[in-house]
Amino acid sequence: MKKIFYTALAACVLTQGRDVSAAQHCLRYEPVVVALSGILVRRTYPGAPNYESIKDGDQPETGYYLKLQSPVCVKAEEKDESSDHDDIKEVQLVLDIKQYATLRPKLGKSISLSGQLFEGFNGHHHTSVLLTVTKDQSISKIKQ
């Protein structure tokens, strides 16, 4: 009986150390809704035509990003064409105009948002994983 207890205790300690199966604790891509917390920041990256340098003539693309409180990992389903990603520290937010206006006063502050994750797939995606923010729940219940 003692051996079973100590084995279970060791498993709990290992789980707290986050070295168990990382995939178990990873977030999933859409359609799963996830909640993320962090600092809301505004960033500008080079856009069209070359997505390399605003100074050399690329259009600036400014958007909102969530700098995460703690890094996360995202695990793709086997049937998905998406990839797994580890150590995600920042996600680009996909917002509509009303959401941008609602979030603007929260820039630089700690907030929580919910929505669906997807993998970046074109030049307008400036992080490897993006969050499409849920229109109703997330914005109306911003946690500070």
Image (cartoon, rainbow, N blue to C red):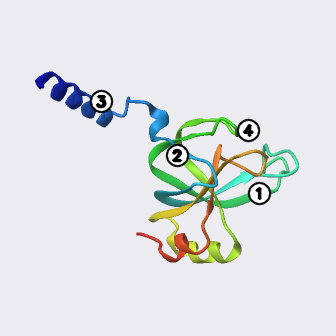
Q: Nearer the viewer, mark 4 or mark 1?
A: 4
Left or right of 53 on screen, residue 41: left
Q: Amino acid at mark 1?
A: Pro
Q: Which residue is mark 4?
A: 81
In three-dimensional space, the C-alpha distance between marks 3 and 2, rounded to whole angstroms, equals 20 Å
Q: Which residue is mark 1?
A: 60
Distance CA(mark 1)–CA(mark 2): 31 Å
Residue 131 image position (x, y, % from top left): 61, 56
* Marked residue nearer the N-terminal end (4 or 1): 1
Q: Amino acid at mark 2?
A: Leu
Cβ–Cβ under 8 Å for marks 1 and 2: no
136 to 62, vertically: above or below: below
Write down the quadrant of residue 25 in the picture.
Answer: top left
Residue 116: percent from left, percent from top: 61, 57
Comparing marks 1 and 3, which lies closer to the viewer?
3
Disc 2: which residue: 27
Instruction: Give the mark nearer the N terminus: 3 vs 4.
Output: 3
Query: Residue 14, which numbered label?
Result: 3
- N-term-proximal mark, 4 vs 2: 2
